[in-house]
Amino acid sequence: MSSIDPKALRTAIAVLVGGITVILDSTIVSVALHQLAADLDTGVGTIQWVSTAYLLALGVVIPLVGWLQGRMGAKRLWMYALGAFLLGSVLCSFAWDAPSLIAFRVVQGLGGGAMMPLMMTMVMQAAQGPDRARLMSVVALPAALGPILGPVIGGLILGVGSWRWLFLVNVPLCLLGLVLAARLIPADQPGRRVRLDVVGLALLSPALVALLWGLSNVSGAGGFTRADVLAPMILGAALLVAFVLWALRGRGEPLVDLEVLRSRPTWAATSLLFLSGASLYGAMLLLPLYWQELRGNSALGAGLLLIPQGVGSLLSRTVAARMLDRISARWVSIVGFIMVGVATVPFALADAHTATWPLLAALFVRGLGLGMVLIPLMSVAFQGLAHAKIPHASTVTRIAQQVGGSAGVALLAVILASTSGTPAHAFDVAFWWTVGFTGVAIALSFALPGRATEPAPEATPEVAKAAA
């Protein structure tokens, strides 16, 4: 790391500490819903909004991040967002009933929703050339490890203490993140003042909220045929189409500049991030359920059995960054997705009596593949974009990951619930679908740049086309 620009490295360290809290929080809380329902004397249907409200708050704020950064500057916005997440965490720990907890989770979601695209923007704007891939191997760490380690940490906390510690555990990390941000992130000046695209905001934020809300309801009886799934998804899709037409009209400055998708590296990476979100989060629905429902493990035991996947993801990051310097994003991505797909096949062939150690080895390989995939995608998505375009690319890629993850979870939940036959057969079918996601991703990876070099950082999307 000694060769990395010190300013970019300091920025990456500061945002990493704060960003870890956001990713871990959503997965830590997911394992506690049944206990929260019992302690707060409410039904599971109501307490589910603890997760849903957080998810919807993310959808509201993500489209605003680029505009807010231009008005306030990245450092100030980061510290405000981290402060809001800290406030929400403290308030959640003092919640007295389900409605208060749900309301405080919205505060958390608003802060966290601003942080996730902003952390990528700040690192990409601070780093240049090969530094981007190496720093992405650090900054992308929470995105891969959060869904894997979150349930383990949540289970451990619930095993020794109150559910309130699920939120209080964020406090020291948030405070450390604020101190590091104040000391390490260089001060920046707000950009030129741009009028808020009110029409774009009125179309895009409700579109994301409606899509995410509809997808979050799919796991109930009836799947995609339910009214509370179809209605919001149709509305969300219509609003999203309207936003695209509005943003491409060529007048004024849109809330999210979709012109960044004219760059082949950006649209290819965005599409693959959608698929990787579906593969990662969709499988994180299936894997714990497999260990619990078919193998009889507890929630904590299932979480511990997923550790090999996290270890693999951790170990492959540095290797992926080095490979990206020597070969290309295209081949690093292809190799990574092949590893993910091949390592998922054993679960598609497994039953309740399959030996445990081969499956743990497969999880380790799967983690290696996931770690390899994220680095080239998160680096190449910004290749050739001008400095001012990076916030827009961050927003687009973050939306793709968020919606992709929700879509993957929803689709696999329906497949798992609707497949006839034994539970083992239902899991086999769902895991084969996950393998199918990776197959599509392998084919799409050929659209990524085929050379290890990248165009000048200030090139425009029209000029900076990836080498075939």
Image (tube, grey):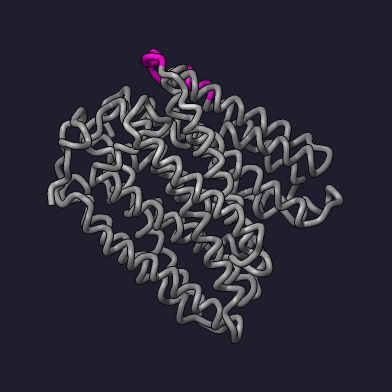
Q: Residue at x 40, y 34 (%)?
A: 256
Residue 152 can be seen in this image: no
16 sits left or right of 456 in the view: right
Q: Residue at x 36, y 59 (%)?
A: 368
Q: Is residue 361 above or below residue 51?
A: below
Indicate the position of residue 49 as horizontal and vertical percent values: 70, 48
Residue 296 can be seen in this image: yes
Q: Quadrant of residue 399?
A: top left
Q: Residue at x 47, y 69 (%)?
A: 360
Q: Nearer the viewer, residue 369 or 208?
A: 208
Indicate the position of residue 462 as horizontal and vertical percent values: 19, 37
108 sits left or right of 431 in the view: right
Q: Is residue 146 above or below residue 302?
A: above
Residue at the bottom extreme, as displayed:
421
Q: Quick one: quadrant of the N terminus?
A: top left
225 sits left or right of 343 in the view: right
- Queried whether the magenta region covers residue 392, the answer comes back as no
181 sits left or right of 451 in the view: right
- Queried whether the magenta region covers residue 192, the answer comes back as yes
Residue at the right extreme, as displayed:
41
Indicate the position of residue 66 as horizontal and vertical percent values: 42, 28
Q: Residue at x 19, y 45 (%)?
A: 325
What are the residue bounds of the magenta stretch? 178-193
